[in-house]
Image: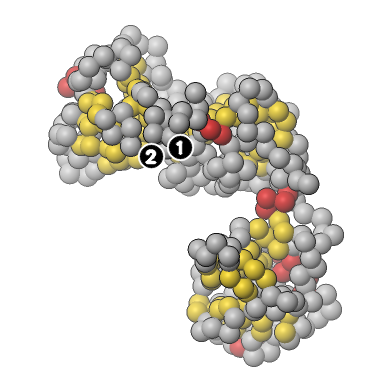
């Protein structure tokens, strides 16, 4: 039986390295040997099912003159998606259907189903577009979100770094502590059973910024909680891809959140209906600019991603009625700001409405070019509609 993530919020637990391998890989069979025709060259068919996508281990299988198929013995039932990964100009279909070109060097869904009983995959068919005589086998196949890897093949551990976790999936929050290993493409477990929408990192052993990852925008973009800087994009060399089970703590540069031997703390947030919401909105420069949450907020945190402006914390504990304008800036040690002209917000039964109309504040449109703002919001009366799961 695979490692089971603790769903209790009453105590911490460890997610060991490699304990979540079964969440990423399906190694229930020897999948190679099912190509028709067999790829040219001895052992070539195993390349599709070795779990490697870079270096010599990531080469695609050899030629299949005129096109080829992967035919799983007895058929294979899938319940959500069939995906393939390819780096050459090939077209794909399943079960003898009409083949179509796919995007390269990424996972592409070629079939899907919503039927509770699933659907049957009898073949994945493919042909090279530029020259059918040099058709290759795919670089990888993924069924229901799991990469097919031959039984007995050693795989990259998921996670690759152990973590100590305090998690409450019911309320969408976990605290993760791990020790960096300095390696590229590392992962560590977060315990939420859902991909975090926002992750806040800090190297506790080094004088570095608090980095905030708005994963709902991009896993490789970040802001700094302790300054006013605009969002930094194109940072996939620092931050990898997060999933329902792990956070991608580094791409190829380990200095920010995976320095060897350094202790890192990460605060992970995932939205929970009726309790919390994370997202973005565009400033309009006009009032009101309404943002739907599905609940009345108790607390909101806002940051302009396109301007060098303060982080904003507003709540109904200090501003007990609308207009809510008592504002704290976590990136400074300033006193409370009470400027309604800059930060005025109405807390409503199903969201919040921005009442400011100018300046680089909560609702600037920068003279017709809309600024994008990220937010985190937490409910005043959580879970009234679903039995109070987090109470």
Residue, x 18% and y 28% (percent of image)?
356
Residue, x 33% and y 27% (percent of image)?
297
- Tell whether label 2 touches label 1 (CB within 8 Å): yes
Residue 301 on image: x %, y %: 37, 27
Badge nearest the viewer, 1 or 2: 1
- Image-quadrant location for residue 352: top left
According to the picture, the residue beneath numbered tag 2 turns out to be 279
Residue 345 on image: x %, y %: 23, 26
Residue 97 on image: x %, y %: 54, 83
Residue 241 on image: x %, y %: 57, 47
- Residue 80 lies, with reference to residue 60, above or below; the image says above
For this orientation, the residue located farthest to the top is 335
- Mark number for residue 271? 1
- Residue 147 lies, with reference to residue 306, above or below; the image says below
Residue, x 50% and y 63% (percent of image)?
114
- Image-quadrant location for residue 52: bottom right
Closer to us: 114 or 386: 386
């Amino acid at each position: 039986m695979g490692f089971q993530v603790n769903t209790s919020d009453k105590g911490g637990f460890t997610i060991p390295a490699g304990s979540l391998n079964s969440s990423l890989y399906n190694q229930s069979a020897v999948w190679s040997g099912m190509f028709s025709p067999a790829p040219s060259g001895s052992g070539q068919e195993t390349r599709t099912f070795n779990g490697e996508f870079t270096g010599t281990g990531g080469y695609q299988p050899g030629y299949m003159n005129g096109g080829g198929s992967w035919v799983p013995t007895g058929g294979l039932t899938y319940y959500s998606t069939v995906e393939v990964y390819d780096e050459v100009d090939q077209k794909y279909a399943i079960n003898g259907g009409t083949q179509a070109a796919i995007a390269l060097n990424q996972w592409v869904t070629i079939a899907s189903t919503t039927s509770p009983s699933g659907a049957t995959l009898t073949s994945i068919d493919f042909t090279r577009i530029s020259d059918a005589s040099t058709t290759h086998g795919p670089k990888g196949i993924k069924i229901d979100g799991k990469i097919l890897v031959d039984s007995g093949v050693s795989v990259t551990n998921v996670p690759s770094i152990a973590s100590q976790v305090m998690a409450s999936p019911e309320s969408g929050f976990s605290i993760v502590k791990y020790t960096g290993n300095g390696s590229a493409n590392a992962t560590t477990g977060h315990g939420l059973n859902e991909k975090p929408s926002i992750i806040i990192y800090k190297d506790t052993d080094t004088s570095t910024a608090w980095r905030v990852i708005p994963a709902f925008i991009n896993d490789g973009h970040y802001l700094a909680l302790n300054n006013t800087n605009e969002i930094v994009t194109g940072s996939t060399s620092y931050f990898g891809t997060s999933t329902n089970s792990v956070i991608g703590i580094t791409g190829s540069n380990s200095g920010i959140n995976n320095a060897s031997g350094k202790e890192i703390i990460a605060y992970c947030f995932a939205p929970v209906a009726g309790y919390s919401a994370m997202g973005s909105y565009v400033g309009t420069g006009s009032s009101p600019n309404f943002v739907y949450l599905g609940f009345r907020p108790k607390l909101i945190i806002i940051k302009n991603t396109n301007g060098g402006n303060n982080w904003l914390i507003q709540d109904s504990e200090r501003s007990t009625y609308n207009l809510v304008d008592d504002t704290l800036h976590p990136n400074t040690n300033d006193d409370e700001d009470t400027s309604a002209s800059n930060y005025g917000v109405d807390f409503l039964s199903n969201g919040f409405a921005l009442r400011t109309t100018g300046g680089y504040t909560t609702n600037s449109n920068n003279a017709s070019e809309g600024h994008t703002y990220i937010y985190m919001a937490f409910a005043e009366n959580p879970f009234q509609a679903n039995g109070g799961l987090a109470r």
